[in-house]
Amino acid sequence: MLKKIKDFLKLSGEPSFQPSVKVDCLWQEIQKLPHVLTKKVVLINKYLSQKAEAQPRDGFIVESGVGVIAETKRIMTTYYFLMNDTPENQEVFASFVNKFMETHRREIIGIDEMTLEKMVVNLLHQKRLLISCAESCTGGTLISRLISVPGASLVTQESYITYSDQAKTKILGIKQKYLEEFGTVSSEVAGKMAERVRIKAISDVGIGVTGYTTSDMPAPEDGLFYYGISFHDTLIVDKDCVEGTRDEMRFDQTTIILWRLLSVLKE
């Protein structure tokens, strides 16, 4: 594949082929090539149906003279843009990539080395906001992704894994009667978790998540989750569903929550 891309960069044709499963490794090699313009953009693809016609298919295509490698992995699609670095191409490349990013600005969850969690932490820091999480089905994955970012200590407060009903009652003060009335996996409980953790931790933003991450559950419960975002006096509650292994489900669930939080913080 690398040879075909080198051929493309030599303007010897417009190859069409499926990429290797290790596109990230390939991309590192491409970036080492001399005089090549590159850009990597990651989109959350669950909400792209209305723009499907604008999406390059998985594989390698050439559009407007720019090479595009598109690779889909569950709820994310990564686009790798490349072109020969010449004075004439620089403007063409920048225009093409900027237009793509403007079209999909709401779905962007990564640009080059800027990951989704970095975007969230940076925005929290810019706005001088503190965040806390109460996690059930995600088991700490959400706060773990946030604190993996250098400087996250400036925006994170205490967070909790309230996996059982007893933990939700003991730590967050959600009454057992409330859990029984609405069900542990419900929009009401997710919202209450978000509000309670924000208040308990004295944070500006509280996140609550409850759901299922097991293939043992019958459809449509398998992968179903509810999440709440408590931001000052505003409470946003939503639900979604993901597929995959337990680890994949947890990662994708937290990706959706972080993407939604990013949108809320930008408003």
Image (cartoon, rainbow, N blue to C red):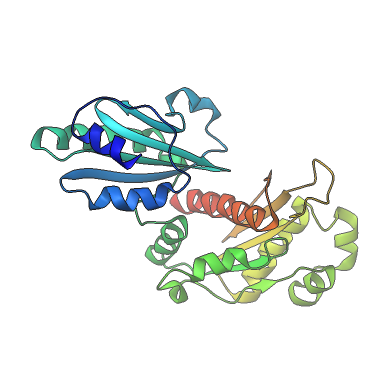
Tell me which residue sits at (55%, 75%) in the image: 157
Give me the residue at 46% from left, 55% from top: 116
Q: Which quarter of the figure has residue 188?
A: bottom right
Residue 176: where, in percent of width, then height?
88, 67
The answer to whether any part of residue 159 appears in the image is yes
Vertical placement of 243 versus 198: above or below? above
User: Horizontal and vertical percent for residue 30?
Assistant: 28, 47
Comparing 224 with 184, the one in front is 224
Q: Residue at x 73, y 48 (%)?
A: 223
Q: Does residue 16 appear left or right of residue 140 in this picture? A: left
Whether residue 59 sits left or right of residue 240 in the image: it is left
Residue sitting farthest toward the front: 3
In this rendering, position of residue 24 left or right of residue 89: right
Say above or below: 131 vs 243.
Answer: below
Name the one closer to the observer, 133 or 89: 89
In the depicted structure, whether residue 28 falls above or below residue 140: above
Measured as percent of width and height from the top left, residue 66 is found at: 27, 31
**How many labels sit on residues?**
0
The answer to whether residue 233 shows anywhere in this view is: no
Give the camera-side residue of 228 and 244. Answer: 244
Measured as percent of width and height from the top left, residue 3 is found at: 29, 39
Q: Nearer the viewer, residue 187 or 41?
A: 41
Residue positioned most to the top:
53
- Quarter of the image for the N terminus: give it: top left
Please tell me which residue is depicted at 66% across the width and 69% down the height of the picture: 197
Image height of 121 relative to 221, above or below: below
